[in-house]
Image (tube, rainbow, N blue to C red):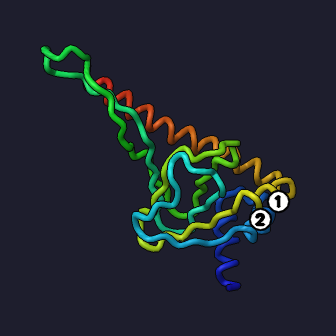
Amino acid sequence: MREKAKERIKTGKLLVPINMELEMGEMMIHFKEKVYEKDEVIYLEGSQADSLMILHSGIVKFFKRVIKRQRSIAKELKHEGFEFKTTAFVGEIHTSELFGDEILIAQSTRYTKAVAGAEGTVCYFLEIDRYNQIKEKYAEVISYLQNIAKQNYSKRMNVVAEDIRIRSSHRK
């Protein structure tokens, strides 16, 4: 048990600058551990954002539902084409990375689907109730993690936008 706590603290410290390591280490005591099998869904897009997560080991893959437009090639059809919903891969993360970070940017629902990309993927999670209890105590670390969360969100949404742009340009 003590070794697992040490691993959790060590993983958390990798996310922050050296001057925040002590505070982050203390905060990591509030996280719990969960192990996922390969291809196991960690959370669904649109589900309640009820925890903050840190990947300890393994891989987490992210997917986003998107609407794609397909132009019709048959001239006799009276419509321009059709739309369909599909899922786009928007990236993956590896050891010691923050995810499930919607609670840090005041989002109430998940903006992507997260799936374990490797057997035995280990994640640490902080439930939202516990987060709300401790966020003032660890305000400096939380502020730093919020900036990471904003960058993560921006990166993932840029991947989706670029995918849509590329697909649209191929159909013209």
Label 2 amino acid?
Answer: Met
Q: Position of residue 16 (x, y in %)?
A: 70, 57
Instruction: Specify the quadrant of the image occupied by residue 2.
Output: bottom right
Q: Position of residue 10 (x, y in %)?
A: 67, 71
Quadrant housing the C terminus: top left
Pointer 2: residues within 10 angstroms few (<14), some, or many (20+)? many
User: Taking 87 as reference, is 3 above or below it?
Assistant: below
Q: Is residue 99 above or below residue 109?
A: below
> Percent x, y for residue 101?
63, 51
Say which of 64 and 154 sits in front. Answer: 64
Up the image or down, 33 lies above or below 155; here it is below
Badge 2 is on which residue? 27
Q: Residue at x 79, y 55 (%)?
A: 132
Gap between marks 2 and 1 measured at Cα:
8 Å
- In the rendered view, does 6 fall on the left or right side of 158? right
Image quadrant assignment for residue 70: top left
Q: Residue at x 13, y 20 (%)?
A: 74
Q: Quadrant of the N terminus?
A: bottom right
Q: Quick check: marks 2 and 1 in contact, CB under 8 Å?
A: yes
> Can you name the residue that lies furthest to the front here?
78
Q: Amino acid at mark 1?
A: Ile
Horizontal side, residue 11 vs residue 156: left or right = right
Horizontal placement of 15 versus 75: left or right?
right
Tag 2, which secondary structure? helix
Question: In what element is the residue under mark 1?
Answer: helix
Q: Name the mark nearer the viewer: 2 or 1.
A: 1
Q: Earlier in the sequence, mark 2 or mark 1?
A: 2
* Residue at the (58%, 54%) spot, across then down: 99
Task: Quickly name the residue at label 1.
Answer: 134
